Amino acid sequence: MKMKCVATVLFTLLLGALLVAPDASAGQKPKLPESYKRWLEEEVVYIIAPMEREVFLKLQADRERDLFIEAFWKQRDPTPGSPENEFKTEHFRRVAYADRYLGRDAPRPGWKTDRGRIYIILGEARDIQRFEGKTSTYDAEVWFYQGKTDIGLPAGFNIVFFKEGGHGEYKLYSPVGDGPQALLAGYFGGPDYQKAYEKLREAEPDLAAVSLSLVPGEGGEAYGRPSMSSDLLIQRIESAAARNIEARYAQKFLQYKDLVEVEYTANYLDSDSLIKVFRDPSGLYFVHYAVEPRRLSVNQYESKYTTTLKVNGRVTTADGRLVHQYEKTVSLDLTAEQMREASGAPFDFQDLFPLLGGDYSLSVLIKNEASKEFTSVEQALRIPQGGTAVQMTQPLLGYRVARLEPGQRRMKAFRIGPFQIYCQPNRVFTRLETLAVAFQLNGLSDELAAGCEVRIEFLKDGQPFRDIRRKPSDYPELPNVLEEVSLADFPPAHYTVRVSVANAGAEVVSAAEEFDLTFAESVPRPWFSSRVLPDPGDPVYAEIMGSQLFNLGRFDEARVFLERAFQKKPGSEDAATNLARVYLALTDAPAVVKTLAPFITPDKAAKYDTYILAAEALRRTGEFGRAVELLDKAVAHYGVNAVLLNSIGECYTGLGKTKEALMAFEKSLELSPDQPEVREKAEKLKKRSLR
């Protein structure tokens, strides 16, 4: 498989790393421009989540900040398909109202006052009681709210404001922090809540009713002391707007702002994912995954519904080294009838790829070209690295199983041996379904298999509920294990499936997965796009594994795989360049030239990487003139760039053509001035030409 964006890595390998001058401002936080500071600290200060604020402060450019602000409002838009963002409109209406009406008795803008803050967060109160001009109590207001359960607040509650000491602006009242005594004018009875409450009830019964508890019917007056839950309610109100938003999009914005096009940046979609690792009969481990976006947008033209998904996957080591990368395009084209059937069900993108043993990080980025939305998945991966010990994969839970005929067993996501498991990332099942529990027992010796026991245990809310015990011989498809369990007599709850192997009473290996059993009689099952890969013997797998070994610096091992792939596909230019790259890393320049010779003939154009690899190999063998010919072809077909010019300069230096070499290096420096090593070479050539 040809790796994308390999040119830069290749040039660095061939020609040496180009030093980049450090940025003097690196690590320093830029001063936030006034307009963005006002947005952060005034306009959205009460509704922005801590994570959103943290991400916004990390942004370096105004363009990034503008895109983030766009994303911020989109995440709160209740009707994304309409031209107006009702949430944003209502928010700024509240801010304007607070400034106009709620700051009249305060020496600061209305949005900064306690009443302004609560109004901006909660909006209009259902009812307001005012206690003003009284001789026995300080001026106070009681705002009553209903219908805020959607943001985690009680069905009905009060908010009290009062003028502390009878003057100044209205202050938010706390039953615990202030108490009824703070509402009484000229009261000197000390901190006795009960005594103050009784006096307040004599003066203003309605005000006394909310002085100990802000929640009607909570009964604080019965105990003669303030309700702690009222102060907790105030805390929940002040964090309600930020708490009610899923702020993970902000992390994704920061993570992917340099990797996705500008028009996608503000349009992050949340998604569910499912990732499992299984071994195929050839011994290769495959990563199987499914990504289920929150929604799938399509374009409509007449009776056709279409979109294109761009999928980019990256696997890296703990130190950030790229091990495997792929890009693919998925076109979806539905008729009106298919769209009607699909509109009530989620969409899953499913795929799989082979991966060497080791510990990695997987990142999958999916972009929808129809809606300019993107979603992503990140997860740590551990791929077994061989050994003699028995290995158990994490169980895969499915809602349906198809048993495949031998001729149908090509590679596809969530195929385990002869079983195609139909599964979904959310792992929610109904009592009308049969649960499929599938996993693998790899490396199970005959001796262990004869005496051990396979256990499948179900834990309901953490407590043992049911278990199944079998001999390995009960599973004829070992190392593939499939157990199908009716859920008819399982009560709806949260469950854990724990699978293990025990020998002589001692547990040898175990793994677990969780699922939920719903009260509903049915759940919408997804429609999906799932690629079918060639049979395990296809040379594409040798290419992939060889490329992964190359990326890990294991060149001798990579050569074995890539030679095998090239032998099976001698006419493949991609296979040839992959192998040539390994030969070059092993300093076998003649082998590079021999491998690429069929692809650099005068009668046809080669690929860019082919020209560069062959030219570098020829330079190393001293064939500078022929190397320049190939580099000139690369320029003619693909245009000029700094690294290509550097290679031309090296070849002309080898030919002793100082003038031509200097011209190449100087042109390279015009395109990319920040190349100290190239500049040094150019200076030396200048001095040589003056002698």
Image (cartoon, rainbow, N blue to C red):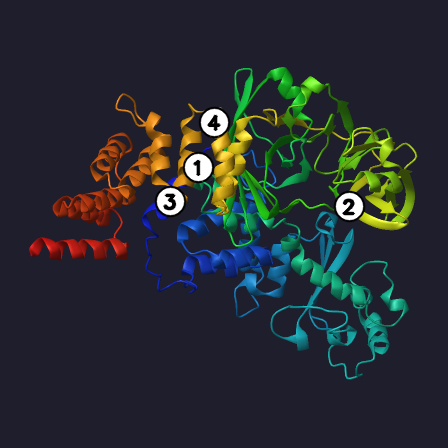
Q: Are marks 1 and 2 in contact (CB under 8 Å)?
A: no
Earlier in the chain: of badge 4 and badge 2, it is: 2
Residue type at mark 1: give it: Lys
- Please give left or right for residue 624 compared with residue 252 in the image: left
Q: Amino acid at mark 3?
A: Thr
In this rendering, which labeled residue sits more in front, label 4 or label 2? 4
Q: Is residue 462 visible?
A: no
Helix, strand or loop at label 2? It is strand
**Depth order, front residue of 5/655:** 655
**Location of mark 1 (residue):** 4
- CA separation in Å, label 4 and label 3: 21 Å
Asked if residue 368 is positioned above or below residue 141 in the image, the reply reads above
Choose mark 2 or mark 3, whichever is in front: 3
Front position in the image: 182 or 527: 527
Q: To which residue does mark 4 refer?
A: 567
Percent across and percent down for residue 247 are 60, 50
Check contact, mark 2 vs mark 3: CB within 8 A: no
Q: What residue did someone put label 2 on? A: 511
Check if mark 4's residue and mark 1's residue have beta carbons within 8 Å. no
Mark 1 Cα shell of 10 Å, populated few (<14), some (14-19), many (≥20): few
Which quadrant holds the C terminus?
A: bottom left
Q: Earlier in the sequence, mark 4 or mark 1?
A: 1
- In the image, which is nearer the foreground, mark 4 or mark 1? 4
Q: Which mark is residue 587?
A: 3
> Which of these two is toward me, 326 or 247?
326
Quadrant housing residue 74:
top right
The answer to which of marks 1 and 2 sits earlier in the sequence is 1
Residue depth check, mark 3 versus mark 1: number of the one nearer the observer: 3
Q: CA distance from mark 4 to mark 2?
A: 41 Å
Image position, residue 199 (x, y; %) = 83, 75
Q: CA distance from mark 1 to mark 2?
A: 36 Å
Residue at x 40% of width, y 36% of height: 580
